[in-house]
Image (cartoon, grey):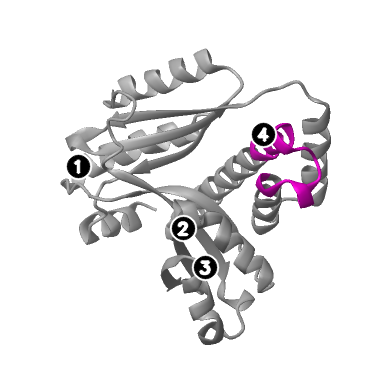
């Protein structure tokens, strides 16, 4: 029986990973579409497209999928709009939702429905501006940096606020305005990041009990599963108790 339970756990994990990978691919395809509409299909002349293509490579997106996305973006009349929502979850936890959508009314309706069903509350635009700060986050496999000590100062000069080595990957954080400078520096050093994103980092965090945390995580998971939702950020303090509880339920 234990063997069966172990297989069920592995299968659930694989399903979750497959779903996450599919979501990442979908987001990159939309990013390619927006980039092509804004600056054309030539990556050398389109910084946003270069970022999207680099992220596609880092996510191991099949070349055929990338080429199809480029071809479709050049010929399609679809227009994706960037939409954001600010909300509060259980226990006053702040939640920031980023979407890419070709139908604003559908996205607003679906996000509102998820919040209502899962106990969240939609807030007004700008109400969470004091909680989240936009940062550039670059994830670089350690194997892609041969002599880190030799280039560390160059990365700092290019705007690196923080550099962490987590699970054999360097996580480089920059201010929003230094995102482009860090891109150029990594290109100059021939260092390929696995991903390069503008993220919303919580300036202050909110500590809640385990039961409240689990409710918020279910709310966040439901939002992330929505087709138009690209990223969900929160300021919930992920305490050791919450982390251990998550590990036991995987």
Q: CA distance from mark 1 to mark 3?
A: 42 Å
* In the displayed structure image, the side of residue 156 where residue 212 appears, left or right: left
Q: Which residues are magenta?
A: 29-48
> For mark 1, what is the residue?
211
Type of secondary structure dominating the magenta stretch: helix
**How far apart in space, not on screen, are marks 2 and 4 (Cα)?**
42 Å
Q: Is residue 80 left or right of residue 104?
A: right
Q: Secondary structure at mark 1?
A: helix
Q: Residue at x 46, y 36 (%)?
A: 224
Q: Which residue is mark 2?
A: 6
Front residue of this view, candidates 247 and 227 = 227
* Of the two numbered discs 4 and 1 in the rendering, the one whose residue sits closer to the viewer: 4
Q: Do labels 2 and 1 touch, CB within 8 Å?
A: no
Separation of disc 4 and disc 1 at Cα?
40 Å
Which disc is residue 34 wearing?
4
Which residue sits at x=29%, y=35%?
A: 128
Nearer the N terminus, badge 1 or badge 3? 3
The answer to whether the residue labelled 3 contacts the one labelled 4, judged by CB atoms less than 8 Å apart, is no
Q: Nearer the viewer, mark 2 or mark 4?
A: 4
Q: Which residue is mark 3?
A: 158
How far apart are labels 3 and 2 at the CA level?
A: 47 Å
């Amino acid at each position: 029986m234990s063997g069966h339970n172990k297989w069920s756990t592995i299968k659930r994990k694989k399903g979750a990973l497959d779903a996450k990978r599919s979501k990442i691919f979908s987001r990159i395809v939309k990013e390619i579409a927006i980039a092509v509409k804004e600056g054309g299909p030539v990556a050398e002349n389109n910084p946003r497209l270069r970022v999207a293509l680099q992220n596609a490579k880092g996510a191991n997106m099949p070349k055929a999928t990338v080429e199809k996305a480029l071809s479709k973006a050049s010929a399609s009349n679809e227009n994706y709009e960037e939409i954001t929502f600010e909300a509060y979850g259980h226990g006053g936890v702040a939640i920031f939702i980023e979407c890419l959508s070709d139908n604003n009314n559908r996205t607003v309706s679906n996000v509102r429905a998820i919040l209502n069903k899962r106990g969240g509350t939609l807030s007004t635009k700008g109400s969470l501006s004091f909680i989240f700060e936009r940062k550039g986050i670059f994830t670089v496999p350690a194997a892609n940096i041969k002599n880190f000590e030799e280039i560390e100062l160059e990365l700092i000069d290019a705007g690196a606020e923080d550099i962490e080595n987590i699970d054999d990957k360097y996580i480089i954080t920059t201010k929003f305005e230094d995102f482009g400078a860090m891109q150029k520096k990594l290109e100059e050093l021939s260092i390929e990041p696995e991903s390069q994103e503008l993220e919303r980092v919580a300036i202050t965090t909110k500590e809640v009990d385990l039961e409240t945390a689990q409710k918020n995580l279910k709310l966040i998971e439901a939002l992330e599963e929505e087709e138009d939702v690209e990223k969900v950020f929160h300021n919930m303090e992920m305490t050791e108790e919450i982390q251990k509880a998550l590990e036991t339920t995987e």
